[in-house]
Amino acid sequence: MKKSISAFLLLAAISQTANAQNAQQMRYWFDRPTSVRGAAVWYNGHPEKWNDANKPITAGDAVRNPDPEWESQSLPIGNGYIGANIMGSVEAERLTINEKSLWRGGPNTKKGASYYWNVNKQSAHVLKDIRKAFAENDWKKAAELTCKNFNSEVPYGSADETPSRFGSFTTAGELYVETGLNGIGMTGYRRELSLDSALAHVEFAKDGVTYRRDYFASFPANVIAVRFGASKTGKQNLVISYAPNPVSEGKMTANSNNELLWNALLDNNNMQYAVRIKAINKGGSISNDGGRLIVKNADEVLILLTADTDYKENFDPDFNDPKTYVGEDPVANTGKWMELASTKGYNQLLDEHYADYTQLFSRVSLQLNDASATKNDRPINQRLADYRRGKQDPYLEQLYYQFGRYLLIASSRPGNLPANLQGIWHNNVDGPWRVDYHNNINLQMNYWPACQTNLMECEQPLFNFIRGLIKPGEVTAKAYFGTRGWTTSVSGNPFGFTSPLDSEDMSWNFSPFAGPWLATHLWNHYDYTRDRKWLANEAYNIIKGAADFAADYLWHRPDGVYTAAPSTSPEHGPIDEGATFAHAVIREILLDAIDANKTLGRNAKERSSWEDALKHIAPYKTGRYGQLMEWSKDIDDPKDEHRHVNHLFGLHPGHTISPVTTPDLAKAARIVLEHRGDGATGWSMGWKLNQWARLHDGNHAYMLYGNLLKNGTLDNLWDTHAPFQIDGNFGGTAGVTEMLMQSHMGFVHLLPALPDAWNSGSVKGLRARGNFVVDIFWKDGKLEYAEIHSGSGGECKVRYGEQTKVLKTQKGKTYKVEF
């Protein structure tokens, strides 16, 4: 008995020592437990009241989430497949559980495959009438034709049709562990998340006993592990139960190995999913009781949980097969995972998890001034409150930066779907914007930090998702626009959905350049990695298809200018005959495709239409206020503070506007940002942060970073739109990287937007285009030196201020650079 308790405390000490060896000690914590809930949020505490009035929130509803503590106080863990949120109450631990592919909707709904796929309008022939209306300056007619012909019949809201075709990401249920304790007389409470180890813990003292719980989500084992222990023997008296998703039907079974299995089907598409829970005790006893596990007088209890669905990715879906996205048996898969994890035990599972996670997370370190976790250490909600009052906190700033990298690792690993609007975490049957894949910036922003912060592997789910759009996206491109290639629309799901939705509000529902924008990520990935085999075998045809679509889409006006007619500036303003955003995206994908074609030595005829389009596309225009115009007409309002800054795409994330190469356009872009202001939703502040960094204005970029932390961040560091929406976390991390290093203009630019507030520091492990890994050290606001490791060899141009050096590098060698 004593031996097991000693092992428990020793392991905790080892974990803390390992963290101490990492100079950053990236962690945050709360000093108070959350309240106790007796039932999942979708019941509002009363399962018998499940009815229309209590059904989940609608798209974009920031008000009706009945569980605000989940949104702002929970600790998120995940392994890219399954995720959980830790609530950490004393009386009853509650974990919300997610499996990323658990989606309603798709072709296997009760109305069949044709009901799902046959939704594209045959509208390509209408384009000539729209363009004729533009030519005759009849913009009203052009808008009316667009609104009536370029939507579909598919509602966005899951409550608007039965069964919902588009569907929604949905909860995998909740795990409850009743402890038999209460909070009266409890002291020393701490609920902590360590970013260094992706390990969470809850600790408190009660009646002379110290209780501790540890949590992690293992990618190698595909399990969530939760360990309950105490400083004295026999103190674990637990009741372990599971609350399933209420819009599914299933069966709970228990076996003699102290294991529970929930095997169920979702209501509207019969997606099968399984959740398997096992308890392993040291001392005491465990029994099954009516689908619950009862632990009595144990010294320590390890709870393992795993989940799976029968969803399979499909890059060649059969439009006539309702089960084209149905794959393996989740019961068998979870059984194999659980059996293997059970034989390993907690220590081995933790070692494997730590080794797997840290080889990703530890690649990049950031040190700002002399910040550390041990200086003025206090709960995260207090740190944020002080920061909002103006107290400087460089540790909080570097913590938020690394939190973005943590979230990307936790929500996007190879072999599964990409991070969605909430990464992988969700606490309801439905949620804001269906918790979908939003393709008009949000999904793209999720992956802005992937390459630059050395997490290239985490981008693979995005590329697989894009591959799944190609075949249906070719149908959409031909039906609506009569083009070659492929595209997609504003909202996506795991079932290859590329059509627009049913709304005639084209300010948000018309987004034909979502596909080309997504495709730019593939060239970007090659540019960072220089993996020619990957470019040739996986990326090129996708890039080519997006470029073919973009080139074919353009209207060849009688005056010889090519414009994107019709087009929009997503979620803002009128239908246009040549919105700046559309032209910027087209430029970007055409440049990428031409570079890819030349890199691989492909036929020059293949790129002729791309080069012709680039030669004739309408140029950027400056308006009457000196601003970069958002539309083809000079109708910008300097008092407009809309959250979208789409017309600055060429500044960021594109590369066709820069203070170095196009200073006049950069000045015009700056005026746009000044007009739009420094506030907005969380993700919008994240985008503006990147744009100010691209303008090389470190102090203004720092202001946006501060605003993001002060006004766009919840207490658990999640980004808020409101509601919680994860893209702002990723945008913030990307923006800080852009402040410290840029490489999009053909050279490695050191400290291009260093703010006065970060007087000294270092960043190590950033990746630059050309496959260079860069460490940067600065003091008194000036560069000391940089070290550049060459991954592929070749020339490396390095810029600092107005000075440039050229390195002739060899693969595998490191070079010290001083100015």
Image (cartoon, rainbow, N blue to C red):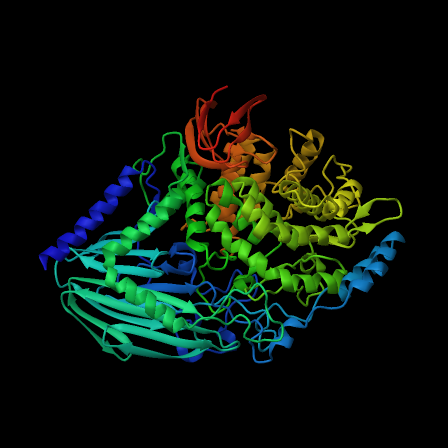
- Horizontally, residue 797 falls left or right of residue 91, namely right
Residue 166 pos. (x, y %)? 59, 69
Q: In which quarter of the image is residue 259?
A: bottom left
Q: Quadrant of the N terminus?
A: bottom left
Q: Residue at x 57, y 76 (%)?
A: 322
| Residue 520 shows up from this direction | yes
Q: Determine the residue located farthest toward the left in the rendered image.
A: 2
* Vertical side of 348 occupied by 603: above or below: above
* Vertical side of 597 occupied by 219: above or below: below
Q: Residue at x 59, y 48 (%)?
A: 536
* Vertical side of 169 occupied by 729: above or below: above
* Vertical side of 155 occupied by 230: above or below: above
Residue 548 pos. (x, y %)? 72, 52
Residue in front for this viewpoint, 538 or 435: 538
Residue 152 pos. (x, y %)? 70, 68
Residue 94 pos. (x, y %)? 33, 64
